[in-house]
Image (cartoon, rainbow, N blue to C red):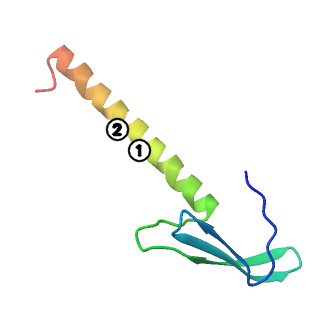
Amino acid sequence: MLYLTRKVGESVVINDEIEVTVIDIRGKSIKLGFTFPAHATVLRREIFDRIQEENRAAAAGSEALAQAVRDQRKLGTGK
């Protein structure tokens, strides 16, 4: 993980496309501004983690369904 020190109004640029600017600092809270291309996806970590978890659960459910269909076909009941 990279750690940087920035003051209000200062920025960092990522991959020539994404700029993160410190907008405000109040106590332990920092307000950041992001400039990024329309094709980029930006999510808060907790939302990203929830989406990944739901995707894994859906994939596991799909695999279970596919296995059940294969099992039925082996038994000759899933025509």
Apparent side of residue 13 relative to residue 59 in the rendered image (left or right): right
**SS at circle 1:** helix
Apparent side of residue 10 relative to residue 58 in the rendered image (left or right): right
Judging depth in this view, the residue of 62 and 23 nearest the camera is 23
Residue under the image location 42 percent in, 36 percent down: 60
Apparent side of residue 6 relative to residue 51 in the rendered image (left or right): right
Determine the image quadrant of residue 46: bottom right
Q: Residue flagged by tag 1: what amino acid is it?
A: Ala
The quarter of the image holding the C terminus is: top left
Residue under the image location 18 percent in, 21 percent down: 73
Judging depth in this view, the residue of 72 and 44 nearest the camera is 44
Residue under the image location 51 percent in, 74 percent down: 36
Q: Residue flagged by tag 2: what amino acid is it?
A: Ser
- Residue 69: x percent and y percent? 24, 28
Determine the image quadrant of residue 25: bottom right
Residue 62's label in the rendered image is 2
Residue 58's label in the rendered image is 1
- Image position of 74 with respect to 7: above or below: above
- Image position of 20 with respect to 4: above or below: below
In the orientation shown, which residue stands out farthest toward the front? 16
In the orientation shown, which residue stands out farthest toward the right? 27
Apparent side of residue 15 relative to residue 74 in the rendered image (left or right): right
Residue 39's label in the rendered image is none
Judging depth in this view, the residue of 16 and 7 nearest the camera is 16
In the orientation shown, which residue stands out farthest toward the top? 75
- Residue 64: x percent and y percent? 36, 31
**SS at circle 2:** helix
Question: How far separated are the C-alphas under marks 1 and 2?
Answer: 6 Å
At label 2, counting other C-alpha atoms closer than 10 Å, the crowd grade (few under 14, some 14-19, many 20 or more) is: few
Determine the image quadrant of residue 26: bottom right
- Residue 40: x percent and y percent? 46, 66
The answer to the question of whether label 1 and label 2 lie on touching residues, with beta carbons closer than 8 A, is yes
